Image (cartoon, coloured by chain):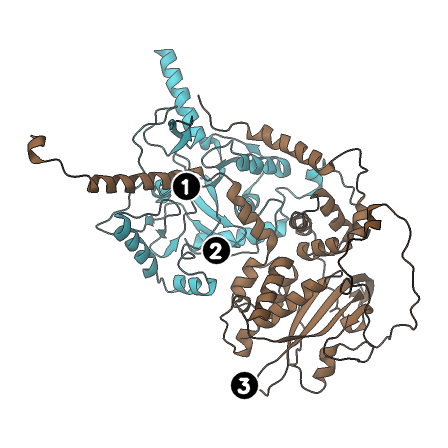
Chain colours: A cyan, B brown
Amino acid sequence: MSIAKSSQADRADYNFAYLDEQTKRMVRRALLKAVAIPGYQVPFGSREMPLARGWGTGGIQITAALLGPTDVLKVIDQGADDTTNAVSIRRFFERVASVKTTTATGDATIIQTRHRIPEQPLQTGQIIVYQVPQPEPLRGLEPREEETRKMHAWAEYGLMQVRLYEEITRYGQAATTYAYPVLVNNRYVMSPTPIPKFDNPKMDMMPALQLFGAGREKRIYAVPPYTSVKSLDFDDHPFTIQQWEKPCALCGSRSSYLDEVVVDDRGGRMFICSDTDYCGGNVTDVASEEASA
Amino acid sequence: MYVAVKGGEAAISATHDLVAEERRGDTSVPELDVSQIREQMKLACARVMNEGSLYDPDLAALALKQSQGDVVEAAFLLRAFRTTLTRFGSTEPVDTGAMHIRRRISATYKDLPGGQILGPTYDYTHRLFDFDLVERTDELPKARTVPAAVDVAMPRVPDILGADGLMEAETAPAGDPRPFDITRDPVEFPADRPVRLQAMARGDEGFLLGLGYSVQRGFGGNHPFAGELRMGEASLHFTPPELDFPIDIGDVTLTECQMINQFAGSKDAPPQFTRGYGFAFGHAERRTMAMALVDRALKARELGEEAKHPAQQEEFVLYHCDNVEASGFVEHLKLPHYVDFQGELELLRKIRGDLERRLRPAPSAEAAE
């Protein structure tokens, strides 16, 4: 065993996109099954990855199994391309797959994301890969996997409705703000991952393929293009999304999800788009309009 | 005015340099050699090999050096390497009964065939500092000659009991198929014993120790006896596809613990002793003893015992004993969560606003007019 291996020759030491071809095949099979049964959690032989569990290893394995040399990859965390973990994952694929990367939502063939769906609507042919910390939407209600699998098999989702009902009776509204449960294709209750409920409506009838990878929990699930994704609610308490009183301080958008930035220690705050590519695009548009005026 | 953190790329690259500097420490102190760690930090290397699931003392030592002695980080490095290795086959089952014994003790018999071999142990040391170790010394401890060669025949204690039918029999399933590999296939529940043993073999020693201890303190109903604890070297035999006989591919240091536990019997089975089994790479007694306690506790379902304590619940034990996964998920809380946090902030402000409006006295009709 030579332990004095060069750290330079990464590409020679590892297969294209890190995973070996047999592992990619195993992941692809799980993906096919997941696409065939929208919203169903498919167990897969999740590999140990050189990045930490809980830091996107499920999404990374899906992306690795999908990537071809001509793909263009975008990686976001909290909607932004420049957050540290997004940078780290993008660098990982630049290193082990030398694929082209982009920050432009429209240019990407594969978008790996944590906690957000881009504001710009995704198109047919694009794939969005979600990193999933906890694939089981019922886990908070029932800790045992043996039980939750049965609940899904029997579509026994009353407990989830009761939880939402209790939130409404207690707070006057559903108090779940992210990872808000959805019903996929009128069959499986699914966790949309911890995206804000603001993004839930984007999942419904989305033209792009949505894939979900939970590395630590060893589950893959999917929503095929143009599939119904309904946020759970009640007729007299319909599902609503977050709203802000002010527009984005940078681009003026009134329709995007905003992050709050504390600007001083006297209660000063500004609200800016969490989707940096979308916000940057708006700012450029405004600037060019002003220039041409 | 835009204050959000930019330049993650530059920051990440700078932190890699900083951590390299931290690792090296004061440069006036000689740098650690990997072989020094391998030879002089053997127990730490053993723990890394166990929790990293790879028998490679050199890489375990390198992992410890690279991680500044952080055992979980070192195990993570080893696992991330192991996952890329080709699986070209399985060895024959290891015969621990035939291992070259360096230590073997039984708490259930005063004397037994093969005798009690104390071997290297901290058990009877007084935990007083040996300040001589502060200074570098190349002086070897005075070697003492063994009065007689260790017996070749060293039967395992549960086998002795098994001959009388007092110990539950444990036989391999028909054909002794290759066991399920928890690192290649997803575990499903209820989990079989090979799955449970594999998960514990790479589980966190501290977690297993705590659970094992909880069984002893009453969160679990078994009274255990340390039937046998043995440590030494065993040969691995492998039959390559091009040969039709097994060849010896080398020795590994192993520790094995077999706990003997009471079992009241049921209406179909006579009372007999049941086994808790612990196994580890290297010299790892605490680890194997803890594992054996938890293994027995996890047999609750098969033995028809009520599984009400944490150590008896396999989903609880198996999911949470993995320290590399646990530390990844706990530490992922360091990642930004501001999108979700913003959702919570918005909700909290909305609920408080609603409440404030409801509690505020309604303005009188005259004032409104």
Q: Position of residue B100 (x, y in %)?
A: 83, 68
Q: CA distance from mark 2 to mark 1?
A: 30 Å
Relative to A279, say whether B150 is above or below: below
**Disc 1 residue type (three-letter):** Asp
Q: How many marks?
A: 3
Circle 3 packing at 10 Å, graded few (<14), some (14-19), many (20+), is few
Q: Which residue is mark 1?
A: B340
The answer to which of A230 and A198 lies nearer the viewer is: A198
Judged from the image, the secondary structure of the residue bearing numbered disc 1 is helix
Judged from the image, the secondary structure of the residue bearing numbered disc 2 is helix
Circle 1 packing at 10 Å, graded few (<14), some (14-19), many (20+), is many
Relative to B117, say whether A116 is above or below: above
Q: CA distance from mark 3 to mark 2?
A: 44 Å
The answer to which of B301 and B367 lies nearer the viewer is: B367
Judged from the image, the secondary structure of the residue bearing numbered disc 3 is loop
The answer to which of B94 and B45 lies nearer the viewer is: B45
Q: Position of residue A265 (x, y in %)?
A: 42, 27
- Using the rendered view, name the quadrant where residue B32 is placed: top right
Q: Which residue is mark 3?
A: B266
Q: Position of residue A263 (x, y in %)?
A: 42, 26
Q: Is residue B39 left or right of residue B169?
A: right
Relative to B24, say whether B109 is above or below: below
Q: Which residue is mark 2?
A: A33
Q: Are marks 3 and 2 in contact (CB under 8 Å)?
A: no
Image mark for residue B99:
none
Q: CA distance from mark 1 to mark 3?
A: 53 Å
**Disc 2 residue type (three-letter):** Lys
